[in-house]
Amino acid sequence: MIRRIALLCLALSVPTFAQTTLNGAGATFPYPMYSKWFSKYHDAHPDIQFNYQSIGSGGGIRQVLAGTVDFGASDGPMSDEQLAQAKIKILHVPTVLGADVPAYNIPGVTGELKFTQEALAGIFLGKITSWNDPAIAKANPDVKLPNDPIIVIHRSDGSGTTYIWTDYLSKISLDWQSQAGKGTSVKWPVGLGGKGNEGVAGMIRQMQGSIGYVELVYAVQNKITYGSVRNAAGEFVKASLDSVTAAAASVKNMPADFRVSITNAPGKDAYPISSFTWLLIPAQSKDAAKGKIIADFLSWMVDDGQKMTADLTYAPLPESVVTKVKAEIKQVR
């Protein structure tokens, strides 16, 4: 009995560590990367848990503005109007680089298609409606394209992946710019909507004759064929770590707030539908303890975390950006 009491007293005297949960929401574009980071960070810090809802960039922006999450995430930077709505300063902390790719499912076509700027804009405007249209066939003379209708798939939710895609289309097509424009949500001229990168990828896999845009890692993980895109230098370039990095290299002067677009970047090796993605971090956390944890996580992310990006087909931040991000993190508290 005495032994049992002694053991009980010993058990009660062992300190228990409080679990801290950080809640975040937003972009699906970097979700595979964030999921891995949050898991690895938890392994090293068992008392810290991340609860991240992959709901799209539009939802992430709304929730960080409402103060219902500890951090948000977006592939499209917040606008001046959105930042003006914030009760406290919101920092844009770049995390990785990724790419939107034109993914497709065409019966009898297994090879890589080449897409010109005119072809992509025409397809998503609904002006090019058949796979053997001359605008597509001319760039792919060695491919036997079927006379099948094109089914356009786009995001149904507010999405940074959509922001990147429409930002690019707005730069290369005046018709697109005037009719639909850019944003996390736009009025689509044609097409069917899927929720999240996961939903769009699933619809492309299921629907023959379809084309849509997804983040590179979703095309790779779902084994969906995707094509190369003609860039600003006139070269057809396929999305890869190197071609996304080449697009980032086009930014000679990074803005102090990191809100920058690298779509349609110059340079013959640059993939034209590339982007940074950002965590949206309140500079002043409502909970000082959480603010410190977030700052520590961000410091880990730009050091150890960057070494994990290639395995998931994301490109790491350029060293020049990492240096500036480390200075930015000092504002978080």
Image (cartoon, grey):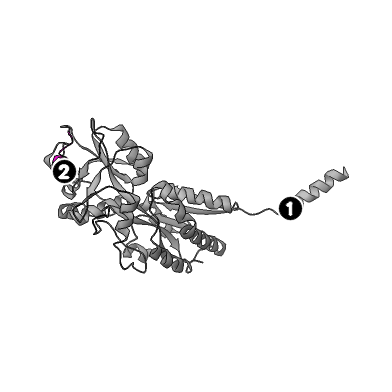
Q: CA distance from mark 1 to mark 2?
A: 70 Å
Residue lying furthest top: 108
User: Reading the chain from its start, which is encountered first: label 1 or label 2?
Assistant: 1
Q: Is residue 31 visible?
A: no
Closer to us: 45 or 196: 45
Closer to us: 30 or 174: 30
**The N terminus lies in quadrant:** top right
- In the rendering, at what x and y percent does residue 313 appear? 38, 48
- Per the image, label 2 sits on a secondary structure element best described as loop
Q: Is residue 15 left or right of residue 266?
A: right
Which quarter of the picture shows residue 45?
bottom right
Give, as a single range, the part of the protein colored magenta. 135-145
- In the rendering, at what x and y percent does residue 61 appear? 38, 56
Q: Is residue 136 magenta?
A: yes
> What amino acid is at disc 1?
Val
Image point 29% across, 57% down: which residue? 247
Image point 24% across, 54% down: which residue? 168
> What amino acid is at disc 2?
Ala
Q: Is residue 229 visible?
A: yes
Find out whether the residues at labels 1 and 2 contact each other: C-beta distance under 8 Å: no
User: Tag 1: Cα neighbours inside 10 Å, few (<14), some, or many (≥20)?
Assistant: few
Residue topped by disc 1: 14
- In the rendering, at what x and y percent does residue 40 appear? 53, 50
Q: Is residue 79 magenta?
A: no
- In the rendering, at what x and y percent does residue 150 appear? 20, 37
